[in-house]
DNA sequence: CGGGGCCTTGAACGTCGTCAAGCGATGTGG
DNA sequence: CCACATCGCTTGACGACGTTCAAGGCCCCG
């Protein structure tokens, strides 16, 4: 199955040809989801892991009085729930944002891979820890930066991640979110997101229209939003 | 070495006697840190993992203009940097809050354990994923709850975690943080933390004085702060 | 006795949320 | 084919939650 995007974006630790083959051979089938379709529901026992091959996915948690927090966004090449292997259930939900294609690795196969190779173990574990590092950066983003910076930071992160898998170039990226979604990711209201988008545009930093971000001045946006990609562990 | 608190708090997956022995035998020495002493500095290559046996530890990131975000607090029985095994460096810093005692497992020993047993792999991986689940709950906490709720939620979480390792009973817990620290954990200023603490006290929910939290009405505080311990994976 | 943390409180301010209204695009059913 | 509902976007007015600035308190320690 088509797991090459995962292997392409995770270059360390280095796998042997045998390990690559075993990894790729551990996926058992493909799945498709429509836009906004639920993929994993909070609390339900999970017995397999899902690797996105096409489309955009969100992980989120609902709070009281209609509030919602997006915890993570996933691009092709990302596992959306590899952490379900050690945890057995998720404490949040996962849903598609766009039309999504994915491939599935059942937990027993994950376990078999960890038995087969300590390097494969390290690789899969590492992938979940990079997700956690992104969670922590979002904590910093929401906790310490103002509204416009938060949105700018999200744009920078998503550009780097999409560019990495060949889905963005020239500082233009498809980010098929509503302004409400942007607010749920940055802990702002849709109204205020709208105002901040206008400000980013007027300041010549970034433009967001119909789910497409155009970064007008990468270097200035990067500095403005205090974006440093170290936490993405691209090495 | 004294790793029994870790094994006590992580009851799944279940280890064989042989696995327990191997795990405990993989620690090589003890370390001590004074209050506020730096344990791991951001970005520096890490070659070992640290398990706290005594004291309280914080993980944090510094932002511009003196802002700081505490990303996690660790109690005895927690690894503070097990994620350094797959990541090789940390994108945040770790420091002691109190006098701290810890034991050390070098990365080669971690790798050896993952080779030895898929169950040990799952256990250690799981432990890092619970940390990540806590990160995500903090994201929800800061992103969707108001000031008093955030502080109340932190009190609830720390009570459960400390109670679990025998360091808190009767809804009283030692939480040796300044009000500035509480603010750095909840994305509030020290001034506002002070006001919210007064409110929590006047509302009969919780009292914080000199680093000691007294939860005055557990059930009401739990509901007020929307605290649900599912994300701690205590099972 | 002086200095420095940490805590406490008040007053003024500002960022962001809330409420409300109107717009355009899309889709559906009468 | 048009009426009408829905959804997302946009903007304005107002208000509130939390920040900033400032001052004074206590306590520990040099």
Image: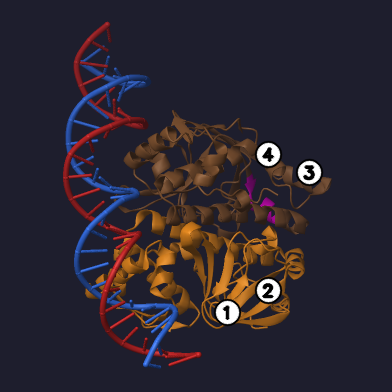
Chain colours: A brown, B orange, C blue, D red
Per the image, the residue denoted by label 3 is A21
**In the rendered image of this protein, does residue A101 appear above or below residue A80?**
above
Q: Secondary structure at mark 1?
A: helix
Q: CA distance from mark 3 to mark 4?
A: 14 Å
Per the image, the residue denoted by label 4 is A5
> Mark 1–mark 3 contact, CB under 8 Å?
no
Q: Chain of mark 2?
A: B
Asked whether A71 falls inside the magenta stretch, the response is no
Q: CA distance from mark 1 to mark 3?
A: 39 Å
Per the image, the residue denoted by label 1 is B5
Q: Secondary structure at mark 3?
A: helix
Q: Position of residue C18 (x, y in %)?
A: 23, 46
Q: Residue at x 44, y 65 (%)?
A: B185
Looking at the image, which residue sits at the far right? A17
Query: Mark number for residue B16?
Result: 2
* Crowd tier of the residue under label 3, counting other residues whose Cα lies within 10 Å: few below 14, some 14–19, many 20 or above: few
* Crowd tier of the residue under label 4, counting other residues whose Cα lies within 10 Å: few below 14, some 14–19, many 20 or above: some
Is residue A26 left or right of B157 when viewed as pictured? Answer: right
Q: CA distance from mark 2 to mark 1?
A: 17 Å
- Respond whether the residues carrying marks 2 and 1 are from the same subunit: yes
Q: Chain of mark 3?
A: A
Q: Which badge, 2 or 1, comes first in the chain's sequence?
A: 1
- Number of marks drawn: 4
- State the extent of the magenta-drawn residues as a range: A105-112
Q: Secondary structure at mark 2?
A: loop
């Amino acid at each position: 199955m088509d797991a090459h995007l995962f292997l392409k974006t995770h270059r360390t630790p280095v796998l042997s040809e045998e390990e690559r083959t075993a990894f790729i051979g551990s996926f058992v089938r493909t799945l498709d989801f429509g836009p906004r379709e639920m993929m994993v529901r909070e609390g339900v026992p999970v017995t397999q892991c899902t690797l996105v091959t096409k489309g955009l996915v969100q992980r989120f948690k609902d709070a009281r009085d209609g509030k919602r927090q997006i915890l993570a966004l996933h691009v092709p090449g990302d596992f959306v729930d590899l952490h379900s292997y050690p945890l057995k259930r998720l404490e949040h939900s996962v849903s598609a944002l766009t039309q999504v294609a994915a491939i599935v690795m059942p937990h027993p196969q994950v376990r078999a891979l960890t038995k087969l190779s300590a390097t494969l173990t390290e690789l899969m574990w590492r992938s979940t820890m990079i997700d956690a590092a992104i969670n922590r950066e979002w904590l910093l983003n929401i906790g310490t930066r103002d509204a416009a910076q938060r949105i700018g930071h999200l744009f920078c992160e998503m550009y780097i991640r999409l560019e990495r898998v060949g889905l963005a170039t020239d500082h233009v990226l498809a980010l098929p979110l509503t302004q409400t979604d942007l607010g749920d990711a940055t802990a702002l209201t849709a109204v205020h997101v709208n105002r901040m988008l206008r400000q980013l545009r007027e300041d010549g930093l970034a433009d967001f229209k119909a789910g497409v971000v155009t970064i007008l001045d990468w270097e200035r946006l990067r500095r403005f939003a205090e974006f440093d990609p170290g936490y993405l562990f691209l090495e």
